[in-house]
Image (cartoon, grey):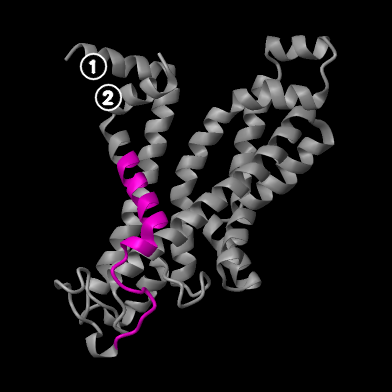
Amino acid sequence: MTGFSQVGQFLHQSGLGRWGLAVTLLLALLAVGAPWLAPYDPAAQNLPERLVPPSGGHWLGTDELGRDILSRIFYGARVSMLVGASVVFGSGLVGLILGSLGGYFGGWLDRLVNVVLINAFLSFPGILLAIGFAAFLGPGLGKVILALIITGWAGYARLARAQVLKTKEMEYVLAARSLGASHARILLRHLLPNILQPVLIQATIGMASAVLAESTLSFLGLGVLTPVPSWGAMLNDARSHLFDAPHMVVSPALAVMAAVLAFNLLGDAFRDWLDPRTRAYLVTLELTR
């Protein structure tokens, strides 16, 4: 059975996985196709039509400057997906390298990585560290990504370290070491492929945390700079119109909720698919229907 057929079979059995994948693909489509799908320029102001409720001309209404909310939601998906993918890739890469090196070599390097660095970063709430680094670096898309990478690598490092500590004592690693394989070959050819599964699961769920963190920073004014649309910045703009124009709050809030829920569902489904016991249970359940 090929990999694609296995994925298709599991998605057929996992309803939550199908929903998570469908919403994730929809967000990716909106992010890529925003210039063609958005009905209006997201930064174009039209003051005579400010605070217009949802209508045929503006499906989700307009904001306090007359900008079309639907168009801004589409372009905000680009920011959220870009931040999520960049933060997960950067944090995962840094954490995987440091955690693997510390777990493999042990000694002073492991104490430095685990006791000093990882514990220091994990001892503070991640969002507070992100706010602190974002305030220090200043607003901007690149600086938000950098701040979230700095505060998010420790979780991946701890996971990678734990997996390497377990895997490096396996027979095939000991056999490779006894045959004279170099440390780089053992790490890249024998350890890395066997520790990627939990890291990939963590990365999928980490997308949700990155999207939520970016929205939080933008809501606080520490995220992307105007006039770049961001769901968090849209929620910040809607605070003063909570009662006279509630549609300004509902749309970006639902967008953030849908993105976070989709990535969490997809991560849970991915974890179940990589767990042989869960896959066997789902197959048995399907056969008994």
Amino acid type of disc 2?
Gln
Residue placed most toward the observer, 27 or 187: 27
Bounds of the magenta segment: 20-46
SS assignment at label 1: helix
In this image, 91 relative to 283: left or right?
right
Q: Which mark is residue 148?
A: none
Q: Mark 2 sits on what residue?
A: 13
Residue farthest toward the left in the current orientation of the protein: 56
Q: Mark 1 and mark 2 in contact (Cβ < 8 Å)?
A: yes
The picture places residue 91, in percent across and down from the top left corner, at 61, 48
91 to 238, vertically: above or below = above
The picture places residue 56, in percent across and down from the top left corner, at 14, 71
Q: Measure the alpha-carbon separation of dots 2 and 1.
A: 7 Å
SS assignment at label 2: helix
Query: In the rendered image, which quarter contains the C terminus?
Result: top left
Location of residue 14 by image quarter? top left
182 to 219, vertically: above or below = above
229 to 86, vertically: above or below = below
The picture places residue 179, in percent across and down from the top left corner, at 82, 9
Residue farthest toward the front in the current orientation of the protein: 36
Amino acid type of disc 1?
Glu
In this image, 137 relative to 77: left or right?
right
User: Residue at coordinates 52% horizontally, 59% vertically from top-left?
Assistant: 127
